[in-house]
Amino acid sequence: MTSKTHHTEVVRATRSSRIAMTLCLALLLALIAMPWWASSGNIRWAIELSCYIAIAQMWNLLAGYAGLVSVGQQAFIGVSGYLLFVLAQNFGVNPFVAVLLSLIAPAILAVPTYLLLRRLDGPYFAIGTWVVAEAVRLATSNIDYVNAGAGLTLRVMTQYSQHEREVGFVLLCALLLLTTIGGSYWLLRSRIGLALTAMRDNPVAAASQGVNVGRLRFYIFIAAAVGTGFAGAIYYMAQLRITPSAGFDPFWGSMSIFIVMVGGIGAIEGVLIGALIYFLADRLFGEFGSAYLIVLGLLTLVIALYARGGVWGLLQKWGDHAWFPVRRKLIVEENP
């Protein structure tokens, strides 16, 4: 009679994830090389899409894991964009360096915002974030130093050639995606990711197992604010102009909700799919104005009611082919 031994192994990477990582790396390199092979129009599209992905992923991290539904993320976009313009235009800081320095503003704003709203829950928290964003917008509209409601123009960008600007933009976008998408993936695969998953599923049970829910939500809120502000600074730097109505536009919140809900909440793959859907829909049907926005709203509602996992959730029903796997799988091999 022969005895059998068992070999166990914990794995995360799958064939689909290896293919996805290879494609992501290839796309990232293609993005960096765009100034040498793509037109200026395509580069502008790539910048815009990168910002959409980053902002949506930060909202996904907030709502999909920390349980914090915010409709006021535009506050961090606006303050980051304005600090960039002030540093570059008024203090002579290199604008590409000023993008990184501008992240101080959303980090500072996020601390009192969270401390003020932390006792609120669900829709009350969401409304609170919108109130804060509106208050910051109104304050900015009345500050003469930043030209009040007229906004600011980034005239210092004229000292760089078009090619130099494009190289700087694609490098910043690559860093943005590495920080927001890559950083989120690294975080979700860490011990903190386990705590986030537990907190998402049941905050009370997570707290009973030793997870400091309040502190973790605080850290995630600040990280999401900084990531959102990073994308906002790059976006308005590319636009060369910012105004209170644009920088603090509630559109940013509704855009994030659409991307995450349609693509799939709680999944990086869902953000990528949702961002691509939104970007293509905006390019193809944006000219229809309010009718187009109504269709997007109805689509979000239908997805929320009948397919809460979004497009990614529907794809997963055909098989578990995660692009960014965060779960551990136990493989047991029986040896004779």
Image: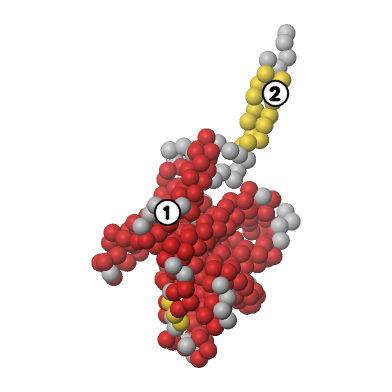
Earlier residue among tags 1 and 2: 2
For label 2, the SS is strand
- Percent across and percent down for residue 78 are 50, 76
Disc 1 versus disc 2: distance between alpha carbons? Answer: 54 Å
Query: In the depicted view, which residue is nearer to us: 238 or 203?
Result: 238
Q: Which residue is drawn at 53% across and 72% down?
A: 95
Query: In the depicted view, which residue is nearer to us: 33 or 215?
Result: 33
Q: How crowded is mark 1: few (under 14 residues within 10 Å), some or many (20 or more)?
A: few
- Percent across and percent down for residue 114 are 62, 73
Left or right of 208 in this view: 329:
left
For label 1, the SS is helix
Quarter of the figure that contains the C terminus: top right
- Percent across and percent down for residue 183 are 60, 55
Which numbered marker is on residue 146? none
Q: Can residue 146 be seen in this view?
A: yes
- Percent across and percent down for residue 266 are 52, 54
Quarter of the figure that contains the N terminus: top right
Residue position for label 2: 6
State whether residue 74 is above or below residue 277.
below
State whether residue 104 is above or below residue 34.
below
Q: Label 2 near label 1: C-beta < 8 Å?
A: no
**Residue lying at the far top of the rendered structure:** 1
State whether residue 283 is above or below residue 331.
below
Query: In the depicted view, which residue is nearer to us: 261 or 89?
Result: 89
Q: Residues within 10 Å of mark 2 (few under 14, many from 20)?
A: few
Q: Residue at x 43, y 62 (%)?
A: 163
Q: Quadrant of residue 216?
A: bottom right
The kind of residue on which mark 1 rests is Trp
Residue position for label 1: 36
Q: Can residue 129 be seen in this view?
A: no
Single out the mark in the foreground, 1 or 2. Answer: 1
Left or right of 241 in this view: 135:
right
